[in-house]
Image (tube, helix red, strand yellow):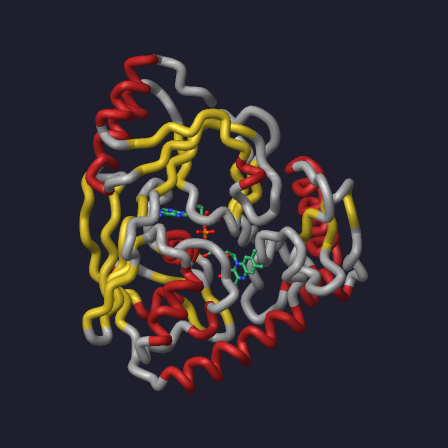
Amino acid sequence: MRIRDPRIVAKLGEIDVELRRGTALADLTSLGIGGTTDLLRIKKHESLPDLLNLLDANHVPHKFLGGGSNLLVGDGELPWVVLQLVRPEPDVVLHGNLAHVYAAADLGRMITYCAKNDLGGMEGLIGVPGTVGGALRMNAGAYGMQIGSYVREVKLHRAASRKIEILRGDQISFEYRHTSFAPDDMMLAVILELPSKPFKEILQGIRICNEKRRASQPLGQKSAGCIFKNPPGASAGRMIDELGLKGLSVGDARVSDRHANFFVNAGHASAKDMLTLIAGVRERVEKTFGVSLEYEVVVWNA
Ligand SMILES: Cc1cc2nc3c(=O)[nH]c(=O)nc-3n(C[C@H](O)[C@H](O)[C@H](O)COP(=O)(O)OP(=O)(O)OC[C@H]3O[C@@H](n4cnc5c(N)ncnc54)[C@H](O)[C@@H]3O)c2cc1C
């Protein structure tokens, strides 16, 4: 979708929002798939209520982009614009055991910075790409931990009140790859309470997690991490593997040979290829195991 109305363009400038016309989302997502739209880069949190009012008043639909590492975006000209927060500097400030972090901060860099300051707990998330905002929204987790366990406070723009608000950690429910935020809430910043640990010990944990990832995931290839959530008490990857579907392809969309729940873009896969592959695998799992797999990847296809 293109913003052509000069009055909207002028207003965007006034509220400090940068308009990047005709941005290819394939370049901003780890799967390397996705069509084109206008990208609006938000330099100040305070602009958000004005920006959202402006878009609503002019019937411009939008979606929030973090680091693009959990997204499967549709092909062609997209029927909405994308909003992204500009990363401020510094993006992490420490006060004792509390890490004040902007949502646009890179998750891995934030974990490493905290580790160097003897704050741990997040070792399992090393190697998870994307932003802190995306991790909060998805309640990113790995190796038995999840980011939600460390959340003390979240600053967000709430769709319901159309205001910037602060929620305490105990007002938010964090479940397996699911949170109680409304779909149109936008994460702006978070305070994480992290346990003190000597850097050496944290580094040891980070090395172990890195090793596990390297051994089991197709890290050199374009993917969005796991495509499906694990159903209670089962592993989506194991079921797909048991069906012998590793290597199955539609065009350049392929079930990874390394990890059956990672689907990779082995060249120039389209969203259509990837969605056809995902639907085919899901159907075969349902037929054989009677389990209807839920998507972990977020699909922006309309
Ligand atoms: C190689 C690889 C390994 C991975 N391993 C793991 C893993 O071990 N565990 C795990 O949980 N995930 C994993 N993932 C998936 C992904 O990295 C995480 O879900 C990550 O937290 C997504 O963050 P992001 O900033 O890239 O979000 P995006 O992909 O940009 O967005 C994901 C969702 O969050 C929303 N969102 C993003 N930012 C905001 C914001 N500021 N406010 C509101 N909504 C927002 C988007 O609208 C979208 O709905 C992996 C991905 C890859 C490619």
Residue 182 placement (x, y as % from top left): 33, 46
Q: Which residue occupies the foreground of this view, 91 or 153?
A: 91
Residue 290 placement (x, y as % from top left): 68, 58
Q: Is residue 44 left or right of residue 18?
A: left
User: Would you identify the image quadrant in which residue 121 lies?
Assistant: bottom left
Residue 64 placement (x, y as % from top left): 40, 40
Residue drawn at the location 34% of the way across and 43% of the way down: 85
Q: Is residue 280 visible?
A: no
Residue that lies at the very extreme toward the front in this rendered image: 89
Q: Is residue 201 left or right of residue 229?
A: left
User: Would you identify the image quadrant in which residue 73 lies?
Assistant: top right
Q: Is residue 86 visible?
A: yes
Q: Is residue 6 above or below residue 96?
A: above
Residue drawn at the location 78% of the way across and 47% of the way down: 249
Task: Give the number of callouts.
Answer: 0
Residue drawn at the location 48% of the way across and 75% of the way down: 144
Q: Is residue 79 left or right of residue 9?
A: right
User: Would you identify the image quadrant in which residue 246 lies?
Assistant: bottom right
Q: Is residue 256 left or right of residue 157?
A: right
Q: Which residue occupies the foreground of this view, 285 or 198?
A: 198
Residue 140 placement (x, y as % from top left): 44, 61
